[in-house]
Image (cartoon, rainbow, N blue to C red):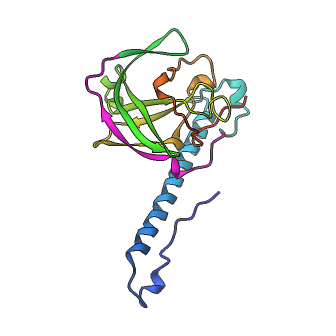
Amino acid sequence: MRYLLIGCIFLCLSCKEEKKYHDVAQKKIVNTRSEAILEILEFQRAMNSEFKNPETSPLPDKYRKDFEILDFFPPDTNYIIHANLIRTPEALPFMMPTTTDRKSEEVVYGVASFYLNGMAHQLEVYQNKELMLQEKYKEYLFLPFTDQTNGKETYAGGRYLDLSIPKGDTIILNFNRAYNPYCAYNKKFSCPLVPSSNRLETKILAGVKAFNK
């Protein structure tokens, strides 16, 4: 499926009448949405490529050899959220349970507040104490969440978002990039369990759907 960027549709009218601000603003919004959709499709393409590659795929060989593509919700810019981020510098580290006996040492970096589907929501955003010491991951933030699609359209254990520390007090939550933990595909992986505080009382109809083996 191809998404065409909007061209300069008002060019032929510019000689007849002055371009209105509303026209320019509307065109910018359309272009921004089109670019966002293209970025989502690129994210999906990259994930499919990762899952096909035997060097990077979490899939067992018996599933990977017949793998074609993951099942995604259609791209939806309504699920790109600009959330208010309240940092929690006094938060103490804690041990987050996983699907195995291992525990992951995390700290609540902040709380993201936003409106979605007519409701107010809050999600805790975490920073891993081990990863934050590595140059490659010092800006990395982790957001696990559950919602009302779990066990139906999506994986029962919830999904994850990878984020980066923002410069200001706004953090972008693009739920079109929500992905399943690797243990949804292969039980050999140890995956953090979603804290009860990160339960969304709404459906997130974006991102990766449940994996049908």
Q: Residue furthest front?
A: 119
* Image vertical order of residue 146 relative to residue 27, above or below: above
Labels in figure, total = 0
Q: Quadrant of the N terminus?
A: bottom right
Q: Position of residue 28 (x, y in %)?
A: 43, 66
Question: 141 left or right of 49?
Answer: left
Q: Position of residue 22 (x, y in %)?
A: 41, 73
Q: Quadrant of the C terminus?
A: top right
Q: Position of residue 165 (x, y in %)?
A: 33, 36
Q: Residue furthest left?
A: 90
| 17 inside magenta stretch | no
Q: Which residue is nearer to you in this view: 4 or 55?
A: 4
What is the span of residues highlighted in magenta in the rendered image?
Answer: 71-93
The image quarter containing residue 126 is top left
* Image vertical order of residue 101 relative to residue 87, above or below: above
Q: Residue furthest bottom?
A: 16
Tell me the residue at 48%/34% (across/down).
161
Q: Position of residue 178 (x, y in %)?
A: 53, 37
* Image vertical order of residue 36 relative to residue 159, above or below: below
Tell me the residue at 66%/33% (across/down).
210
Tell me the residue at 26%/26% (across/down).
89
Question: 37 left or right of 123?
Answer: right
